[in-house]
Image: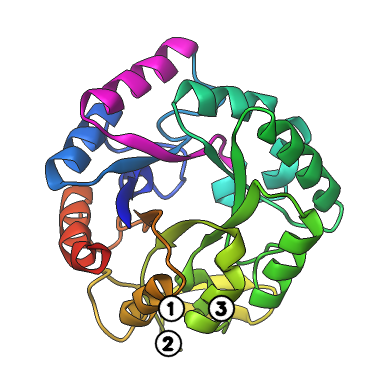
Amino acid sequence: MKLSLSVRVAETASKRDATHTFTQLTELAAGLGYEAVCMRASQVGIHSPLEQITAARKQAESLNLKVSMVTGDFPVPLNNEQGPDGLRNITPYLDLTELLGADLIRIAMKVEADIPWAQRASDEAAERGIRLAHQSHTQSLFETVDGSVDVLKRVGRKNFGIIYEPANLDLCAQNYGVETLNRFSPYLFNVYLQNHIRRPEGKTHLLTWIQGVVPHDPIRLQDERGIDFLQVFEGLEAIGYNGYVTVHQAFREIMEPEDAADQSYTYLKPFCT
């Protein structure tokens, strides 16, 4: 398994603005030993000029970093009603992904009507050797394990898959261990990791469709009493996963990006050898 650092570690709460330049982030990632960065629109997106996109690819390649995945707009990470709109015009996202030298795009789906659009977008992406994936996420068609597998089967495209994210599954009271990973295995394109503790006194409140509002507190990846990462990696090993494991957490409430990237790498690297 290979470690990737999401540029989300250096985003403001709005998810639109970056606190660090792409040069700073790539130098940080490469210096620590990450093999890739996960791109989001806070750095480069479909709105970005060609010169900025090509410069980002050149910068990453100069440090032997891949771009593990591309989230090309703001509505997808914001998980708002406009999130699925990209499926209805996937071409700009494919162009962006090709220019960055990547082959995986994160998309969003909210309602049943998004399924045929996901099929069409996947077909267009397949013509260019690009894959599409949806993250395990609250308030989406991928909130539960059963719902996720159902949508994956209904879309029914080899280049359409899932980004396994145990923390979101945990918020929805879903099993995220080997049983779930066995079900996700045929469709597993990426792994996102972040950590929290669910507790009644939690200061962060997130709405889920299945569990209502879930109070929790973000914690570092290495902190105990949150996500059971030993169970996560035992499951990933059991299914033979050898793709990217992405440090996806927004650490801004608890630590600086440099410390987050460093400590997360130190904690995760032994799991990935």
Identify whether 250 is placed above or below 66.
below
Kindly check if marks 3 and 1 are in contact, taking CB atoms under 8 A apart as contact.
no
- The amino acid type of the residue labelled 1 equals His
Identify whether 11 is placed above or below 231.
above
Label 3: state its secondary structure: helix
Q: State the CA–CA distance, disc 1 to disc 2.
A: 5 Å
Q: On the image, numbered disc 2 is attached to which residue?
A: 199
Q: State the CA–CA distance, disc 2 to disc 3.
A: 23 Å
Circle 3 residues within 10 Å: few <14, some 14–19, many ≥20: some
Quadrant containing the N terminus is: bottom left
Circle 1 residues within 10 Å: few <14, some 14–19, many ≥20: some
Magenta region: 50-74
Residue closer to the observer: 207 or 225: 225
- The amino acid type of the residue labelled 3 equals Thr
Residue shown at 21% from the left, 42% from the top: 29
Circle 2 residues within 10 Å: few <14, some 14–19, many ≥20: few
- Is any atom of residue 153 visible in this view? yes
Kindly check if marks 1 and 2 are in contact, taking CB atoms under 8 A apart as contact.
yes
Q: Residue furthest top?
A: 51
Q: On the image, numbered disc 1 is attached to which residue?
A: 216
Q: Is residue 2 left or right of residue 153?
A: left
Q: Nearer the viewer, mark 3 or mark 1?
A: 3
Q: Magenta span has 214?
A: no
Q: On the image, numbered disc 3 is attached to which residue?
A: 180
Residue closer to the observer: 219 or 39: 39
